[in-house]
Amino acid sequence: MQDTICQIATSLGVGAISIIRVSGDESIKIVNSIFDGKDLETVSSHTIHYGYIKDQKEIIDEVLVSIMKAPKTYTVEDVVEINCHGGIETTNKVLELLLLNGCRLAEPGEFTKRAFLNGRIDLMQAEAVADLINSKTDKARKVAISGLKGNGSQLIKNLRKDLIVIISNIEVNIDYPEYEDIYEVTENDLKIKIKEIKAKLENIIKEYENAKIITDGIKTVIVGQPNVGKSSLLNQLLGEEKAIVTNIPGTTRDIVEGEILIDGIKLNIIDTAGIRETDDLVERIGVKKSLNIIDQATLTLLLLDNNKELSNLDLELIEKTKDKTSIIVVNKNDLETKLDTTSFKNRNIVYINTLSNDGLKSLKQEIKRLFNIEKIEASDYNYITNVRQIAKIKACLNSIKDIEIGLKNNQELDILEMDLKNIWFLLGTIIGETYEEELLDELFSRFCVGK
């Protein structure tokens, strides 16, 4: 991290302002060498200065330059931000001048990586930065902000503190058995402590399900036979004519997607090809994709026709979705009822009419009930949302199970201590107390450039 890096921090395109960020020991000196205005090497920290960016021949742009001196900066290094006009050519020209005068082009996420390596944030907070940038709903934003503030990190740190107390007591018992006035860790003590830690880890995983709904949304697939009203339902939910609606069977031959919000939770809705036997090659491919998507979906909306008796294909779909989170949506409730629902009376059923929007509100309410959307507290967003982090938590739980087995088998304390240390180590990898360089490279490569 000895070199000075630079990168465009805003979207490259035509706009009012473009920001180029520079970080490193030489950042102020390098920017000063191409700046026509005050001597930036003599100005106070956290000040903004008007002037021009120039090369040897001409003025490139009129700019405002922000000077932020270490350590009170994003990277804990000297940071300079050049606010120039948002033209593509102008921005690239300023970036080119910085590179010619000693800067190196920053890799994706390298500014945040430096913030982590310099100790300003931990690894969970660094990942929360990416989550904040990618958040698509207000609730997802709040979860990311909570992570950025270090609330999730504190949860992990508290668990590590609990573990280190147990580990240190065990080590004292092992190393100094002759001392009578030290606290002796008993099998019962260890069982109680392990139970407490296990409960906390399990609660983190349980709340992760809520977090996934908040951050990723609910992958919702609409399935059913042709002409049952799938595309009409999609259009009604989206409030736009996203899918083509005709009375010709097989109109939808591939998936059509859209998004809606229900109480701040995103539904990623997929309208699939009508499921039926067909000789049409393209339609057959669409039907196969539809069946595969059912297995991948978080929620399945199985559409049936109220005016038709159940077919064998309907029965197959009912069977395929019985063990999944699903709602049977009975369409055309204004027509004569020929559909026998007795065979699936224990399923979640909603009656609608896609011609009049009748039942749409009831469908949304049923979705909210199934996923407890109303119970996801708006005031508490201290979730662990990252797949990498939750995988480590699950690995900790596996070690907890090994300890429980060891306690049942009266295993020696020094053997159990090894598992406790493994849990402590795994929790450390979540917040970045311990890490491998390859992990950091892979993790920060997912960030956008300039962050």
Image: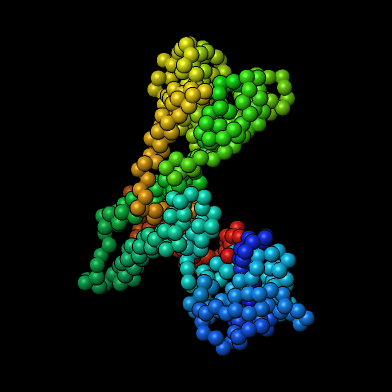
Q: Residue at x 39, y 51 (%)?
A: 204
Vertical placement of residue 379 versus 279, above or below: below
Q: Is residue 67 left or right of residue 277?
A: left
Q: x, y (%) of residue 87?
A: 69, 64
- In the displayed image of the protein, which residue is found farthest to the bottom? 42
Q: In the image as oriented, which residue stretches furthest toward the right?
A: 57
- Choose between 268 and 87: the one closer to the eye: 87
Q: Which quarter of the figure has residue 415?
A: bottom left
Asked if residue 60 can be seen in this view, the reply is yes
* In the foreground, 408 or 444: 444
Answer with left or right where residue 12 lies relative to residue 431. right
Which residue corresponds to the image point at 78% horizontal and 81% vertical from the top-left?
57
State how the image is colored.
Answer: rainbow
- How many marks the image carries: the answer is 0
Query: Dividing the image into 4 quarters, which one contains the N terminus?
Result: bottom right
Position of 297 with respect to 187 (left or right) is right
Q: Is residue 174 visible?
A: no
Could you tell me residue 399's position as x and y percent? Answer: 42, 53
Rendering coords of residue 319 (x, y %): 50, 22
Q: In what quadrant of the picture does the C terminus appear?
A: bottom right
The residue sitting at 72% across, 22% down in the picture is 280
Q: Where's residue 281, x and y in %?
A: 73, 25
Q: Residue at x 65, y 65 (%)?
A: 86
